[in-house]
Amino acid sequence: MSAIFAGVLVVLTAIDIERRIVPNRIVLPATAVVLAGQLLLNPDRWLEFVLATVGAGLFLFLPRLLYPAGMGLGDVKLAMLLGAGLGASVVAAFVVGLLAGFVAAVYLLITRGSSARKMAIPFVPFLAFGGLVALYLT
């Protein structure tokens, strides 16, 4: 299950960098497959994986509600994939991913000045990085 999860994260990262989208035809079936696989492989942790899937999506949906231009729904759906693949470790993935995104934003502010505040940067690579770190280190 980890190989499928990691592979999808890599594919979605490449697509988001190139096209700035997270295709539903990839992320939604992948979330369903990964969640189903986790439930089959870890039936005693079913509640953890279901709550992590829903909770991770809600965690990124709230900022989307507050500032719709700041984040796309693809990022929200990716968060659900992270929850399905990582369970409770999705918290570590968010910490690492948000920290990596913050470092990149600070770098852009330093190198590009105030014009960087208007730049759109893809968020999936940072979330995917956090997901892979959490997958292999937790």
Image: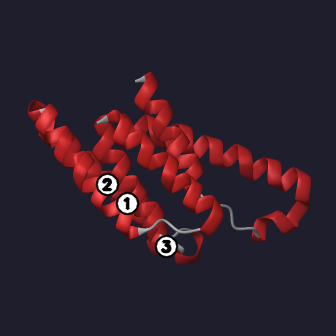
Nearer to the camera, 78 or 89:
78
Number of marks in picture: 3
**Real-space CA distance between mark 3 and mark 2, rounded to the nearest whole angstrom:** 27 Å
**Real-space CA distance between mark 2 and mark 1, rounded to the nearest whole angstrom:** 5 Å
Q: Is residue 3 left or right of residue 52?
A: right
Label 3: how many Cα within 10 Å (few below 14, some 14–19, many 20+): few
Residue at (58, 54) in percent of width and height: 14
Any mark on residue 66, and which? 3
Q: Looking at numbered disc 3 in the image, what kind of residue is underneath it?
A: Leu
> Helix or strand or loop: what does disc 1 sit on?
helix
Up the image or down, 137 lies above or below 47; here it is above
Nearer to the camera, 103 or 19:
19
> Answer yes or no: do the residues labelled 3 and 1 have beta carbons within 8 Å?
no
- The residue that label 2 is drawn on is 30
Up the image or down, 113 lies above or below 2; here it is below
Nearer to the camera, 55 or 33:
33
> Helix or strand or loop: what does disc 2 sit on?
helix
Q: Residue 122 in the image: state x and y as whole percent.
A: 62, 60
Label 2: how many Cα within 10 Å (few below 14, some 14–19, many 20+): many
Q: Earlier in the sequence, mark 3 or mark 1?
A: 1
Q: Residue 31 in the image: state x and y as whole percent.
A: 29, 54
- The residue that label 1 is drawn on is 27
Residue at (88, 51) in percent of width and height: 110
Residue at (40, 24) in percent of width and height: 138
- Quadrant, the N terminus: top left
Instruction: Locate residue 19: give its quadrant.
Output: bottom right
> Answer yes or no: do the residues labelled 2 and 1 have beta carbons within 8 Å?
yes
Residue at (71, 43) in percent of width and height: 103
Q: Looking at numbered disc 2 in the image, what kind of residue is underneath it?
A: Ala
Q: Residue 81 in the image: state x and y as whole percent.
A: 35, 51
Q: Is residue 31 left or right of residue 60?
A: left
